[in-house]
Amino acid sequence: MSEILHIHVQDGPQVGQKLPIPPEGATIGGKGSDADIELSGVPYGVRYAHLKNVAGKWNLIEFDPRSILLNSKPLKRKNVLKHNDQLVLPSLKKGQTIRLAVEVEVIKEKKVSKGDKPKINPMYLAMGGAYMVLMLLVVLYFAFAAPSDQASDGPFDISQVKLALDKDIEELSSQTYEGAKLVVLGDGASDFSELRRLLGSTTDPITIKNYSDTFKSKVARLFSDAWRLEQQERYDEAADSYQSIVNIMVDRNLKTTNIALQRLATLR
């Protein structure tokens, strides 16, 4: 006796789709996560779970702890899936989730005597061929025709954040200051205004570079923390983190500030 697993998508861009799980199992994640099954509508680039057949039973193994609910409850250490179970994944939309319904089909193996030859109903062969053609059309549609998620709903690229910071600081360094003098900031610049004052001073280049690198690392870390809070659906905390970046950058016309404001717009 064996079990065949199907997943029914009940929310999001792929609502109504039935996803067959291969006998060897599959991983589930968002677009760009390199998972076997990449779902639209869930956070980009994150693999959430591995559906694995263990001794004839389907087990759910979570990659990202506490991000999935099974029948409205957090996952346990061992999770055996049953027919009609409900999985809940995070959604890109604030206050929403992506629900997946579990369909477990039990196949009873028929004993065949040595003299008997297994017979295959021609109708099953025809249905199987039609199903394969349909699945191929679905794959081609989502590969070439389906609209992609809007960039504003996707994750930021940390390399873009670092590039924006470099450009903001580079443009600041090229400006001319009058009455420049030596500036000492103690442990570092608390905001971009203090960094601007340092860059316009007569402080030695090595010290200026060290302060600039420290400031860039601080802002990049804040962006990473804010995005992590988004993935955990802690949207209010994520919005507060992006707002703190806006406050630290001071000037709303900066490229780095603009990235933080764009993330804030997706949460409000």
Image (tube, rainbow, N blue to C red):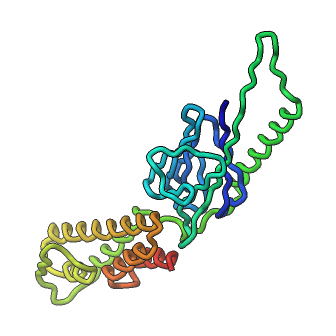
* Residue positioned most to the top: 115
The residue positioned 88% from the left and 30% from the top of the image is: 122
Residue 36 is situated, as x and y percent measured from the top left of the image, at 58, 45
Q: Quadrant of the N terminus?
A: top right
Front-lying residue, 68 or 228: 68
Q: Is residue 206 above or below residue 86?
A: below
All told, the count of numbered labels is: 0
Q: Please state which of residues 71 and 42 is positioned toward the viewer in this rendering.
A: 71
> Residue drawn 50% across and 76% down?
267
> Farthest residue in the bottom direction?
179
Q: Is residue 102 left or right of residue 178?
A: right
Residue at 26 percent across and 80 percent down: it is 191
Residue drawn at 13 percent across, 81 percent down:
183
Q: Is 134 on the left-hand or right-hand side of 242?
A: right
Q: Where on the picture, by quarter, is residue 184? A: bottom left
Residue 246 place in picture, x, y as percent = 37, 80
Residue 20 percent across, percent down from the top left: 68, 44
Q: Position of residue 230 (x, y in %)?
A: 45, 67
Q: Quadrant of residue 113?
A: top right
